[in-house]
Image (cartoon, coloured by chain):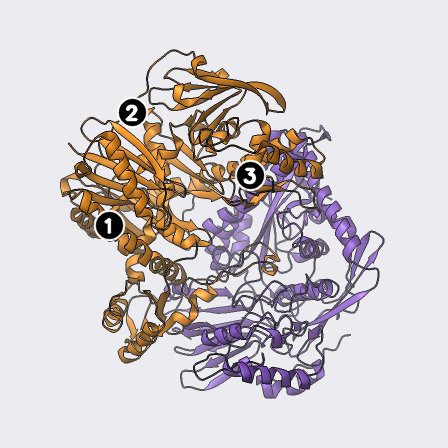
Amino acid sequence: MARIIETNTDGFKSVDVDLVTVDIIENALRNARYEMDAVLFRTAMSPGIREQHDEFPLIADHKGRMVVGQFGSFIGGFLDNYAGDIEEGDVFLTSDPYSCDGAISHANDWLVLMPIFLDGRVVGWSAMFGHMTDVGGKVPGSLPTDAHSIHEEGVVIPPIKIYNKGQLNTELLDLILNQVRMKQWNRSDLNAIVAACRTAGRRVVELCQRFGTDIYISTLEALLDRNYRAMSQLIQNTISTEKLSFTDYIDDDGLGNGPYKIHCTMWREGDHVVLDFEGTDPQSIGPINFFLNVNMFKMFFGIYMIMVFDPQILWNDGFYPLVEVRIPNRSLLKPEYPAALSCRTHGLGRIFDVLGGLLGQRQPEFLCAAGFSSSPHLMYSGTDRNGEWFQLYQIGFGGIPGRPFGDGPDGHSLWPSFTNVPNEFLEAYFPLVIESYETVPDSGGAGFFRGGNGIDIAYRFLEPGTISIHDDRWLTYPWGVNGGEPGMRSTKYLIRSNGSKEILPSKCDNVDVNVNDVLHYVTWGGGGWGDPLIRDPELVALELKRGLITVAGARNYGVVLNQDFSLDEDATAELRSQLLKSRPGLEVFNRGGEIVDLKERCEAETGLIAPIDPVFT
Amino acid sequence: MSYILGVDVGGTFTDLLLINETNGETHRAKVPSTPSDPSIGVLEGISKICDRAGISQADLSHVMHGTTVATNAVLEGKGAKVGLIVTQGYRQILQIARSFVPGGLAGWIVWPKPTPLALLENTVEAKERISAKGEVIEELDEPAMIESLKYLAGQDVKALTISLINSFTNDSHERRIAELAASVMGEIPISLSSKILPEIKEYERTLTTVANSYVRPTAAKYLKNLEDELTKIAPSARLHILRSDGGLMGVETASSAPVNMLMSGPAGGVSGALWLARQSGYKNLLTLDMGGTSTDVALVQDGEPRIGRETTVGDLTIRASSVDVRTVGAGGGSIAHVPELTKALRVGPQSAGAVPGPAAYGKGGLEPTVTDANAVLGYLPVGLLDGEMELDYEASQTAVAGVAQALDLDIYKAASGIVDIVNENMFGALRLVSVQQGYDPREFALVAFGGAGPLHANALGRLMGSWPVIIPPSPGVLCAYGDATTRLRSESSRTYIRRFSSTSDREIEKLLGELHQEASTELLGEGVSADLQEVTYSVDVRYHGQGFEVTIGLSSNEVSGAILEIIGDRFAKEHERLFTFALDTECELVHLRAVVQGEHPKVSAEMIAQADSDASSAVISTREIYVDGAMASASIYDRRKLRANNVINGPAIVTEMDSTTLILPGHAGKLDTFGNLIINPISAN
């Protein structure tokens, strides 16, 4: 249990705050949060953070409850576990998921948090974590697909004071940086994260000074209470006491076993909702375990619930007492130390599909198709002809699912604020040429609203090196909903410089590449939403002209086109009525087949051997 | 005798300002805008103002024009059908964009993705490839290109963009395709990405160049008509167009690169505010231009507006230099609402727009807007447009009562809540350009204009600690002032990514010299002789490995010295100011730029009659208003009757043709010689 050293022991007075002040402070906190992002993006160095924005900021109240952010607070857990003193000017750093209840879920994420002091008292906390391109360990990028324990996954930093009363602990930092491959990136990314947290600190202090500390603190209570009340109503109105379940899968663990099951059941008990992961598979021997922080999952749940009703609301921890999350011990979502964790990205992504599938069963306004792509990664590293080490870590994007409000965009990101890296930038800084950067026609599932297409990126390598790939959904399909078809699965293959084709597994390390080998990195499409046979046929014709679907793909919509790609209305009407008669009834979820069948067809369809059912001891 | 004319076309009015170059005497005029062909309004205005001044139109020497014709084409989605030619493998460059989905986690569920400005069916690929270093990896396949161009011709595109990968390092293929296109497609405006934005980042370069093509036919046609008509009535007048960065450019440049005039409107406002405030001795300014649907804010330091590298219009953000104006969706028409679930008071971003407009306008609007809140509070005593437009106060009351009921507040508290929240939104924007850029707002004066700015300015000055608050005379013709008082400007830039260790002072000097030549040539073409040109340089710098750059300015006499050292020192200071830390990492240059400007026109501001502090002769009436949480008695003043040195103590309201100013209790406004209303807290007076 941490001891906070405050020179001012006066408690905060609870005061009445008028509603407008509450709204003004809410707005100011939102601005402060975006300012944290802005400072980070502009000063960080690794492309993963500064171009792709793999980072998450947070501002908390004096008790450590998140008042603005997106991933929920972990400060309470930190305070419980940290054994030392906390003083003004201290800045903490950790990358150990096991020391913060999974607030960060692999050692690549460096979490910085700091108390915000004013007049000798803690008035709040700011924190941010970001994904480091490399934290050492056995493979470049530090996400070894064959790891059996976290000790193979690079340097793991327990909660430490990286700044002690404002003084940087340089020896400690040097010790940490000595373990990693891209020191300069880690150093400046850390610098940038600290600068962002300090910016938030300054803004909180300014707010206290502007309104008075008591008013500021009382306002935060009001904001937390606002979330509580809103969520309380939503839970009462929209969640039944009857149990609903949903299951989705992670295809394999990188070691030839899979798929792994994530199963969640939801119901209401009195005024609160229970989300129970009983039925989820036990932890894996490989690195796909996803240590799911309970508060983080509550936050995901809350955001999905409120999004549609008041998008301007500031998410905070206020509603946490209304949500109970149960995760079985030693399961895929609550692995036991020292289980390997690095490749948790698939589990993190899949959690959103599970959440969507669960919530959507009762409320059509929430039901989106699947496609919450994990964030597939590519690493390419080596030593170039001038003897300089290069190391690329890039996050790919796929198709956004078909949604109740429209088509899923093609090749976009479901992660907040993420963007792609400009290809000219990659070509300028890494020895490669991006030969094509296109979405894959028909990869988005057909539907009244089409799923977004996945992307095919063709990388031509200009220096020998090795690559690593982290992806999923190569076996199971991104499911469609309400009659929509599933999206296409992901695939990765190399065209060697001699013209031979080599299919790569979805998760692999240490694949040697040579000059002029071309990697096709194909991500998956989003599932479709609603009956494709009632999609506007003119729109189908237009999308064919645009190259977003093919002639064969148009038939999934029952649409027939003339030579010049204009709509053949008669043939379309006939085909549609024919298809209507012959097809089975529409299901709410279309997964493209049972797991057994998918496995049976696996090698023929994907060129890869089917994983074997995981055995748990 | 020769005369300078500033003309600004706004949504409702076209404002004109005529200045006698010899003695500085000015005339103003206002005519209704003619949105279907704005040049009609301009020409009517010219005729009106010349009549009023008793001069012949032939005496006009310069016509300086701010126009939103290109901006409106974007906002209304009425630009040209654009054909786009990209490198093979990149046909979906605008479709994929940067893969970014706004709105935070789960934002994708509700985000409506905008359609690309160049449609996919009008996008073709060129078989060719240039490397990042500028080498030709694959020669252009000309026969295939010609076939694709024929296809585009068949698609009836009205403008063409050519944007190839790495063309910023080697433009030869883009130029060759332009030649082929000219022969296949005939008269079609062609925009090359290597010309419009010779910078790295393929999506931004392509989008910017497509935006240029999108507005080009509209802008070119408008400018040509105007110039033709102008030549008939004033053969010796030169027409210049206001650029987004606050400078002027010739018609030819404007017609081929209209993407540089998308922020012409806001730039005019900032330039005008700067010019007027400067007369009163203020050079560090925050500007606040609040209109019906949005508010633009900007920062001026030491007489120079901050220039940003991006221009945002509606959903579209492109890379083009413009006055660093930040826009928030907060205006007089912003609608207040209370979401059922959270019972929070939200103002905007939805706006009642011009139709139906605020409830007070009596055009069928029922929802409570900021204007309605101001009406309820008693801040709009005589209606709008000098009383020509009556307000329906009862409708405002009814609309605001809905919000009051939902919040369980009385109507005045609800109305002032709406005003407080909209002020807070603008406060956020003002902080973006000041505090968040490392500037202390207490060192800046706040200049407010636009129809609604002067109503909210005093409150914002108080929030920011920015004094004085300056309300210029006739806030409505401010843009025309800006048009008439700014100068010609031309900019040349190129991407030059080099670590400091792999370049040299003399190399940079040579490159900047070349850019200077380029920019200078354009101004020579506009009749500005070399000895009247002023050149400044800027370079974008970052620590090697960073993705964003900081722009560092250089004066013309610094480039012959130890440039890299100067840049390095300045960059470290700037980085520390912006981000609180500097690194000992090597610096890297990214872009080089030369800006050449002509002379400022010699114009002096008009003065108003002098008097003493007693303003009582300008009082129209007295009424009760709700301000700072209580009812108070406020005097209403007619601005036209105010004289220099008059002092008005708050609470008070000053009305004029196109604007209303609120002076809060505890504050006083004083008229200066130039008619600026200067508001300060009373203790500071």
Q: Name the residue under label 2.
A: B606
- Chain ID, mark 2: B
C-alpha separation, residue under disc 1 versus residue under disc 3: 42 Å
Q: Where is residue B455 in the image (x, y as percent from the top left)?
A: 50, 30
Q: Which residue is drawn at 21% across and 30% down?
A: B54
Q: Where is residue A599 in the image (x, y as percent from the top left)?
A: 67, 84
B127 with respect to B470 (left or right): left
Say whether mark 2 and mark 1 are on the same chain.
Answer: yes
Q: Nearer the viewer, residue B539 or A450?
A: A450
Q: Nearer the viewer, residue B648 or B33?
A: B33
Of mark 2 and mark 3, the one earlier in the sequence is 3
Q: Name the residue under label 1.
A: B251
Of mark 1 and mark 2, the one earlier in the sequence is 1
Q: Position of residue A330 (x, y in %)?
A: 76, 65
A275 with respect to A153 (left or right): right
Chain identifier, colour purple:
A
Q: Helix, strand or loop at disc 3?
A: loop
Mark 1 is surrounded, within 10 Å at the Cα level, by few (under 14), some (14 to 19) or many (20 or more) other residues, namely: many
Q: Nearer the viewer, residue B129 or B27?
A: B27
Q: Chain B takes which shade in the image?
A: orange
| Of labels 1 and 3, the one closer to you | 3
Q: Name the residue under label 3.
A: B362
- Chain ID, mark 3: B
Q: Disc 1 vs disc 2: Cβ atoms closer than 8 Å? A: no
Residue B257 against residue B412 in the figure, above or below: below
Mark 3 is surrounded, within 10 Å at the Cα level, by few (under 14), some (14 to 19) or many (20 or more) other residues, namely: some
Q: Disc 2 vs disc 3: Cβ atoms closer than 8 Å? A: no
Residue B560 seen in this snapshot: no
Name the amino acid type tagged 3.
Gly
Q: Helix, strand or loop at disc 2?
A: loop
